[in-house]
Image (cartoon, helix red, strand yellow):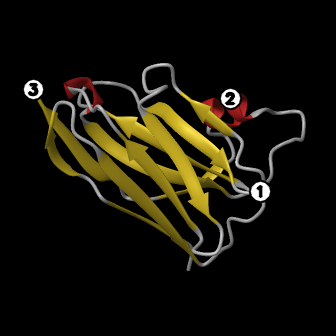
Amino acid sequence: QVQLVESGGGVVQSGDSLRLSCAASGFTLDYYAIGWFRQAPGKEREAVSCVKMTDGSTYYADSVKGRFTVSRDRTKNTAYLEMSNLKPEDTAIYYCAAESRRPPSWMNMDERCKTVEYMGYWGKGSQVTVSS
């Protein structure tokens, strides 16, 4: 059974840090990308960051560049999102997702992350709340 399980969310204050984890089971992430997405109340889901499992190439939304770091541990089939200097506007449910099929080779990480067309596996989400 394919499963993605997020953990590490919580309630923090502005300026604090959190680390989200996304553990995959039932399939291997080796040749695909995994991404972090978030959705705040009343807003559309947005792509936060993605990482390619093979070479570690990444994408970051402008709103999190310099504050968030995505990484992966292939031996643990797990991806992470290190979030620092958190702001109230980072408050959202954070979802991890993994590609279930390989995108065309011409697609770069920006496109793979933003289109989510190939993100076939999704976790249930983890709430992150940042108070001012």
Pointer 2 with pointer 3, Cβ within 8 A: no
10 Å crowding of disc 2: few (<14), some (14-19), many (20+): some
Above/below status of 100 relative to 88? below
Provide the secondary structure element on which disc 2 rests. Answer: helix
Horizontal and vertical percent position of residue 36: 49, 44
Q: In the image, what residue type sits under mark 2?
A: Asp
Mark before the other along the chain sequence, 2 or 3: 2
Q: Is residue 52 left or right of residue 63?
A: right
Q: In the image, what residue type sits under mark 3?
A: Ser
Q: Is residue 70 left or right of residue 51?
A: left
- What residue do we see at 27% from left, 43% from top? 17
Residue occupied by mark 1: 54
Residue occupied by mark 2: 110
- What residue do we see at 57% from left, 74% from top? 76
Residue ranking furthest to the top? 62
Residue occupied by mark 3: 132
Q: In the image, what residue type sits under mark 1?
A: Thr
Above/below status of 81 relative to 89? below
Provide the secondary structure element on which disc 1 rests. Answer: loop
Q: Quadrant of the N terminus?
A: bottom right
- What residue do we see at 20% from left, 27% from top? 88
Above/below status of 35 relative to 5? above
Mark before the other along the chain sequence, 1 or 2: 1
Pointer 1 with pointer 2, Cβ within 8 A: no
User: To which quarter of the image does residue 59 belong?
Assistant: top right
The span from disc 3 to disc 1 (Cα, nearest Å) is 38 Å
User: To which quarter of the image does residue 38 belong?
Assistant: top left
